[in-house]
Image: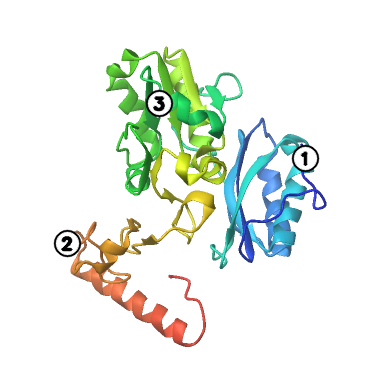
Amino acid sequence: MTQTLENAPAATDGPFLVAALYHFTPFARFRDFRAPLQATCDENGVKGTLLLAHEGINGTIAGPEEGLRRVLAFLRAQPEFQNLEHKESGAAKMPFLRMKVRLKKEIVTMGVENIDPLKVVGTYVEPKDWNALISDPDTIVIDTRNDYETAIGIFKGAVDPNTKTFREFPEWVRQNPGLHNKPKLAMYCTGGIRCEKATAFMKENGFDEVYHLKGGILKYLEEVPPEESLWEGACFVFDERVSITHGLNQGEHTLCHACRYPLTPEDRASPLFEEGVSCPHCHGTRSAADLERYRERQRQIALARKRGERHMGS
């Protein structure tokens, strides 16, 4: 059902509302839509990133609740996005610095021609039914996210492909014929979009029973109580919150601004951690010139904080 400002659900706790969204649809006019979408977001105080392509829209945006709901209503007023769904959570502070609307070849880049989730896709599984599926001994569970995401959280018993980018996923499948050893494949990702293409790819490559978590990890953490959960750890998100946990509460992770790896409190307590400069995951991999540049950036961030300002590099 299309949501309006009047019938939209209440926001999750926090002065800012965050909406993760994607929608596959034929969208020939995506280039012409960029400017009006950017203007609508700017007028309503909404920030984040939205990707537009011939296959649809994808991204995460945040703003004051009223402003964000106006942007969602504007999107759903377009004939291509009438059935757009989104997942929302709250944030204590604005998790983005600016609003970017970008034109892309794909709204999620797999790099494989002729993979179309509108033609073939896996079977959607509601969060309430996910535990039973992944606990079935006839099921192989696959995390389609990248290594820095799986490092901080994963479903119990899931296979981690350890990919650096989603482009590596098809080759990982080709290199693992053992995936055919069980009749069922259950796949998941953060919000669901990568699984649209991943399950389509698997179906196109001879896998019959292919399932994916509807709404992704975000929907599971929102709906499944912690005491029933098979999720272990936190879920990486692509904004300044860095991670979220059950109930879509902000996690304890921060981001290393040198290597972009999510850091635990233990990582930050390490002697190899220097804020804005290095962490246990990247220590010793940067040149002296890079380290000095990072330290200068961190000095400028600290000065901006003292002035009560927000540095663009933070």
The quarter of the image holding the C terminus is: bottom left
Q: In front here: 3 or 292?
A: 3
Residue drawn 41% across and 38% down?
Answer: 230
Circle on res. 2: 1
User: Can residue 92 be seen by looking at this rendering?
Assistant: yes
Total numbered labels: 3
Q: Residues within 10 Å of mark 2 (few under 14, many from 20)?
A: few
Q: Quadrant of residue 165?
A: top left
Looking at the picture, does residue 128 appear above or below residue 12? above
Q: CA distance from mark 3 to mark 2?
A: 41 Å
Q: Can you identify the residue that label 2 sits on? A: 284
Residue drawn 44% across and 33% down?
Answer: 110
Residue drawn 53% across and 36% down?
Answer: 193
Q: In front here: 21 or 14?
A: 14
Q: CA distance from mark 1 to mark 3?
A: 34 Å
Q: Amino acid at mark 1?
A: Thr
Q: In front here: 135 or 275?
A: 135
Looking at the picture, does residue 293 appear above or below residue 140? below
Query: In the image, residue 280 lies at what x, y percent?
Result: 22, 60
Residue 165 lies left or right of residue 95; in this view the side is: left
Q: Can you identify the residue that label 3 sits on? A: 135
Q: Residues within 10 Å of mark 3 (few under 14, many from 20)?
A: some
Query: Which mark sits nearer the N-terminus, 3 or 2?
Result: 3
